[in-house]
Amino acid sequence: MTASLGSIVCDDNMVGGAFPTKEDLDFFDKFAEIVDGAELSRMTPNVLVMAPKKIAFKNLQHLPKTTNLDKNIGRLFDIFIRRMIQAAAGDLENTCYWLNLRHLDHHGTDGYWIRHKTYKMANGHKIIELIGKNWQSENNNIPKVGLDQTMILSMKVFTKEGLDQTPVMKVFASAPRCDENCSMNTLTQEMDETNMLLDVVGLESIL
């Protein structure tokens, strides 16, 4: 099941042609979480911003076996991007966005960037391609960012003026990290299992 990230080609059935369906959002909620939730805040009349937020993966052992882990993770990023553009009242062909993925302890200029692209030009699988190319690069001056529990996402969406001017929009609600049936030891074990799975099944080259 191991895949070479530098050579991933995103086939059409892994790329969304419309905003996320309920099935897409259920898939995201099952396998990923934006810790503390995600909000789009209006910075200017036509720019909405999601402040840096931690993204965590979960239940990866239950991901569909019909494709490899690289593409499943790419699908999660893809759903996230489409949902944020939808919340900003944009569209997938013309609305431009910026997205950054970095580690918690890196500077804002580090990590992987999609700059002023439309979804049609750069979808969620582009992030996986960028990670693969970076890890195959011999340039040690570029920080190596892998998929683990300290990943931070931030985003800007550029919309047309005159659309909905709501100052803050909640997009991905936060989920409780623990309830009466679990403990911090359980959460730690789940995080360790997630990292182990990422290391063993297809993504070991980017950890």
Image (spheres, rainbow, N blue to C red):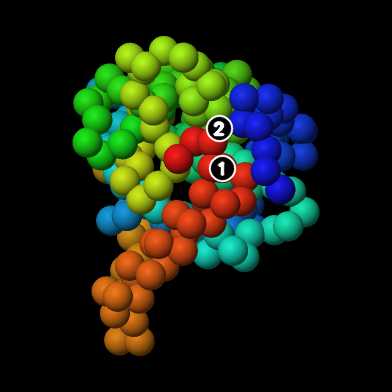
> 10 Å neighbourhood of mark 1: few (<14), some, or many (≥20)?
many
Q: Is residue 78 above or below residue 182?
A: above
For the residue pair 109 and 140, the one nearer the viewer reads as 140
Q: Position of residue 167 (x, y in %)?
A: 25, 38
Horizontally, residue 144 falls left or right of residue 65, namely left
Write down the residue under mark 1.
203
Q: Position of residue 117 (x, y in %)?
A: 50, 17
**Mark 2 secondary-structure assignment:** helix
For the question of whether residue 143 can be seen, the reply is: yes
Task: Kindly identify the amino acid type of the residue bearing the numbered disc 1.
Answer: Leu
**Mark 1 secondary-structure assignment:** loop
State the residue at coordinates (76%, 32%). 11
Q: Position of residue 62 (x, y in %)?
A: 62, 65
Q: Position of residue 96 (x, y in %)?
A: 47, 20
For the residue pair 2 and 46, the one nearer the viewer reads as 2
Give whichever of discs 1 and 2 has the lower sequence position.
2
State the residue at coordinates (71%, 48%). 1
Q: Is residue 96 above or below residue 90?
A: above
State the residue at coordinates (22%, 36%). 105
Front of the two marks 1 and 2: 1
Residue 132 image label: none
Horizontally, residue 84 falls left or right of residue 53, namely right
Write down the residue under mark 2.
128
Horizontally, residue 30 falls left or right of residue 103, namely right
**What residue occupies the far bottom of the structure in this picture?**
181
State the residue at coordinates (39%, 28%). 144
